[in-house]
Amino acid sequence: MSPYDMVVTPRGLRFMGQHYPCTIGRGGITDTKTEGDMATPRGTHYIVGMMYRPDRIIPPNDWATPILPGDLWSDDPKLPDYNHMVRAPYAGSAENLRMAEPLYDLMFVTDWNYPDATPNAGSAIFMHQWRRPGFPTAGCVALRRDHLFAVATQIKPGTALLVR
């Protein structure tokens, strides 16, 4: 384990000697992740991307990429681009990455079922801003906005997110 690893614990997210309160999926932690189960998958997930809303914030890191109008994330297991970023218009089911609420103003993309996605094994396990303390996600790990930004300035591609 590296000091740069992020570890989800009962006390929150442990990173670089700090503990940050976090929320996980309303389905709890699972060993058998499936699409739509609202659970956070157990395991070691690596950060493979950082995305931000350039109309709302400045990039927190030099490797962050902007979320542009029309950016979506496919959650349609019937299509070949399942669990990948796609562009609108899109014929399948997808999540809008540029939503009105600030959840995805800054987000980290994990390698859960990515880039070689298995249909129905779950899509879009991100780290992002929470709605409010204790409010569960649809399977992602979420932090308070200022904590997410603090982490964003220190992580690098390949930083591990350990969910136990």
Image: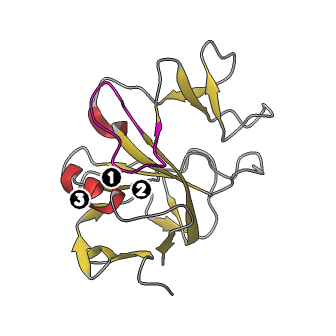
| Residue at image mark 3 | 147
Name which of mark 3 and mark 2 comes first in the sequence. Answer: 2
Name which of mark 2 and mark 1 comes first in the sequence. Answer: 2
- Which residue is depicted at the point 56% across and 44% down? 36
Name which of mark 3 and mark 1 comes first in the sequence. Answer: 1
**Left or right: 19 as drawn, with respect to 128:** left
Q: CA distance from mark 3 to mark 1?
A: 17 Å
**Disc 2 secondary structure class:** loop
Query: 1 or 82, which is in the foreground?
Result: 1
Query: 21 or 16, which is in the foreground?
Result: 16
From the top left corner, tell me how far across and down residue 100 is, in percent.
Answer: 31, 23
Q: CA distance from mark 3 to mark 2?
A: 18 Å
| Residue at image mark 2 | 25
**Disc 1 secondary structure class:** loop
Which amino acid is tagged 2? Gly
Q: Residues within 10 Å of mark 3 (few under 14, many from 20)?
A: some
**Left or right: 102 as drawn, with respect to 75:** left
Magenta stretch contains residue 56: yes
Q: Residues within 10 Å of mark 2 (few under 14, many from 20)?
A: many
**Left or right: 120 as drawn, with respect to 35:** right
The image shows residue 43, relative to residue 61, as above or below, that is: below
Secondary structure mostly seen in the magenta stretch: loop
- Which residue is depicted at the point 66% across and 38% down? 84
Choose mark 3 or mark 1, whichever is in front.
3
> Which image quarter: residue 45?
bottom right
- Which residue is depicted at the point 63% across and 36% down? 75
> Magenta segment range?
52-65
Magenta stretch contains residue 58: yes
From the top left corner, tell me how far across and down residue 7 is, in percent.
Answer: 41, 76
Which amino acid is tagged 3? His
The reply to whether the C-beta atoms of the residues labelled 2 and 1 are less than 8 Å apart is: yes
| Residue at image mark 1 | 136
